[in-house]
Image: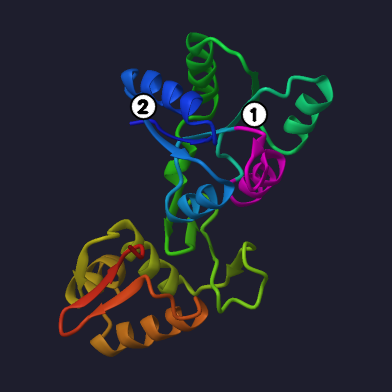
Amino acid sequence: MVELYYIEDNPDIAGTVKEYLEKKGFSVTICATLAQARRDLKKHVPTLVLLDWNMPDGYGDGICRWIRSNWKELPIIFLTVRGDSCDMVSGFKNGADDYVVKPFELEVLYSRILALLRRTGNAAEQYLSCGGIMIDQNRRTVSCYSERNPLPLGNREEINLSAAEYQLLLYLMRNKGKTVTREMILEKVWDVNGNYVNDNTLTVTMKRLRDKLYHPACIKTVRSVGYRMEDAV
């Protein structure tokens, strides 16, 4: 299913677009503020973002740059009343893939979304996110946000993981919301490559992973069973 985040503070416009696109089979999440959009994007990356320019807590160009710096292939369409050529040029310079001026026809918006997705595919599938941690599977990179991260809040830090730490995090992320036993991890992360390791290796690898990720709350220890990765409620 195509998942859209629509960053729009006008409930009438947001509701109309949401209703129309959901009839077309899309899943649409409305973000009424930029702050909400940032929170939602840190938890889950959608297929495409629709973005208004004037928001109650800032402007769309800033969050467009932020999205593009974190998710390079994520499609972005500006959907705004600002139709001057300078605004459109600025939108594209800040990372937008398309620019639609209000008022607009819903059928035209739908067609432009489909056209953009034909070019990009579902780029969101390469990104796995949980609790501010993100894996880019294509680039095999890991980055994170954290209040304990020394970088300013809102910036990402790329984390250098060993091969074993990366595979452990990847397995937990792919099974987000599920409790995985230590035996399952040892089998899927290590034994699948023909490398026998003992239980202590997992304990040490997990400790090092947590240290590098600033001890994230999203990685839970299930006592006497294993681990579970989940977003905070």
Pinpoint residue 65: horizontal percent, then vertical percent: 69, 45
Measured as percent of width and height from the top left, residue 40 is found at: 46, 50
Q: Is residue 114 above or below residue 200?
A: above
Residue farthest along the right direction in this orientation: 86
Q: Which residue is mark 1?
A: 97
Residue 209: quarter of image: bottom left
Q: Amino acid at mark 1?
A: Asp
Q: Is residue 93 magenta?
A: no
**Quadrant of image for the C terminus:** bottom left
Segment colored magenta: 52-71
Left or right, residue 230 beside residue 162: left
The color scheme shown is rainbow
Foreground pick, 153 / 125: 153
Counting from the top left corner in percent of width and height, residue 16 is at 43, 21
Label tally: 2
Distance (Cα) linking label 2 and label 1: 19 Å
Q: Residue at horizontal 55%, vertical 53%?
A: 139
Q: Is residue 93 above or below residue 218?
A: above
